[in-house]
Image (tube, rainbow, N blue to C red):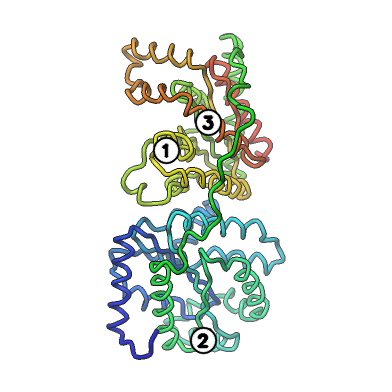
Amino acid sequence: MNKHDSAKEMETRISALQRRLRAGGIPLLLMFEGPSAAGRGRLISKLINLFDSRGYRLVTSSVLSESADKRIPMQKFWINTPGKGRIAIFERTPYGELVERAMEGRSIKRQLSHVMDFERTLAADGALVLKIFLDISAKEQRRRLKKLDRNKCSSWRVTDDDWRQNRRFEKYQGRMERIMSASDTEFAPWLRLDCGDLKEAKGALFGMVAGFIEERLGGAKPSATVPPPSPASRIPDSPTDRIDLSLSLSREEYERRLEELQEELLDLELKSYRKRLPVIIAFEGCDAAGKGGAIKRLTQGLDPRGFEVIPVAAPDETERRHHYLWRFWRSFPKKGHFAIFDRTWYGRVLVERVEGFCSENDWRRAYDEINAMEECLSDSGAVLCKFWLHISQEEQLRRFNDRKNSEWKSWKLSDEDWRNREKWPQYKKAVDEMLVRTSTEHAPWTIVEAECKLYSRIKVLSTVIESLKRKGA
């Protein structure tokens, strides 16, 4: 900040930038990291006083800690990301947990890549991401901790972990330096703030934040300096053309196996709860392919306290203001619980692609974003099952007519179903590319031959059971 700028001038400058962010629908994510007693609370308090309080949200350490033990690690950061035109200020970053892990001698390579994927995904969607490291010396930290500890009103804030960090300060700084060097990118840079003198640091912080926003809004370093979306590619062999739709099951065999599998799944649900495994089951498929029936048989024998079925429709107004993955991160289950999605995040590369609800750049970028998200979920211990239920055009028409002519099924059929059917070739192309690009080692697709509903329901149950066993349930 210019030394001659007054507090009022800086407030005017920051307020004008906040209005520009709001008008442009640009989210701003500010994340603070640094050693204990660096002055984080005081500096953030001064900064937010410059913002219109209706346009920002402070995400405190306590908010992040409350969900840390129950949630998938990156979930607590994703669900608190700002909507378009809003500001989110994180009192802590995901890197704080990484440096603690590194100091214990554990590998952080994969976790670091997940944090950087988080930043890259938001930046590619237009968000501004800035990380600020509050820098003090070990001597200054020790002086401040002693001062806080002597005061009865503030001694509660000083913990054993704070003193432990001070004793190992050189090691902490070394690990943090390496992490910052590896994660300092154009789309989510690190800026260092000298906090030895908090009065000077306050002015420097204001100028730092204002300068960053002005630079990005001015286009000098646009937030879109991220890897380009996946290029168009030829799908050499159609996965849906190889499906054997003649596979079937007799009613007698179906009833016998259904009861056995539902009992086994209930047992695995209880084991998953004890082992605190989050379980995510995702259903996609042609219209009238039998997703609802498969979900019903999947949940019939489960303890209802341990699962939630999430029907996915068009995003509402709040969801449209966020990144398209935000609403799914909000719905991912707590550890030990099941989340069953009736349609999923793959809408971005299916209906949104075919119907033109997003740009080609957006849906091409989504393949890598989805793969990164699913790898993060898998690495965090989640069981992830993805099902594509497939039927022929002829069977779909038969089921549509059956619904049309049935008094108790007619509500299932809409004009949109008929419109989608007219675009079968476009959807087929999108499905084939989705299956090829997003069937990975950590999150493979299971293609379900759904011409026979009895067969498809048993295959779904069997696959979920096998997946739970492989993950250690």
Q: For the N terminus, give its image quadrant.
A: bottom left
Question: What residue do we see at 66% from left, 76% from top?
Answer: 174
Q: Secondary structure at mark 1?
A: helix
- Amino acid at the residue labelled 2: Arg
Q: Is residue 264 above or below residue 8?
A: above
Name the spot of residue 372 as percent of width and height, x first: 58, 49
Question: What residue do we see at 58% from left, 17% from top?
Answer: 455
Q: Is residue 124 visible?
A: yes
Name the spot of residue 220 as percent of width and height, x first: 45, 69
Using the rendered view, name the quadrant where residue 459 is placed. Answer: top right
Whichever of callouts 1 and 3 sits on the residue coming sooner in the sequence is: 1
Using the rendered view, name the quadrant where residue 280 is placed. Answer: top right
Q: Are marks 2 and 1 in contact (CB under 8 Å)?
A: no
Q: Which residue is mark 2?
A: 144
Q: Residues within 10 Å of mark 2 (few under 14, many from 20)?
A: some
Name the spot of residue 148 as percent of width and height, x first: 48, 84
State the separation of the CA atoms marked 2 and 3: 59 Å
- Amino acid at the residue labelled 3: Val
- Amino acid at the residue labelled 1: Glu
Q: Residues within 10 Å of mark 1 (few under 14, many from 20)?
A: some
> In the rendering, which numbered label is found on residue 127?
none
Q: For the C terminus, give its image quadrant.
A: top right
Q: Residues within 10 Å of mark 3 (few under 14, many from 20)?
A: many
Q: Which residue is mark 1?
A: 352
- The foreground one among 303 and 1 is 1
Q: Which residue is mark 3?
A: 431
Q: Point out the frontmost of discs 2 and 3.
A: 3
State the separation of the CA atoms marked 1 and 3: 12 Å
Question: What residue do we see at 51% from left, 44% from top?
Answer: 364
Q: Is residue 244 above or below residue 94?
A: above
Q: Secondary structure at mark 3?
A: helix
The number of numbered discs placed on residues in the rendered structure image is 3
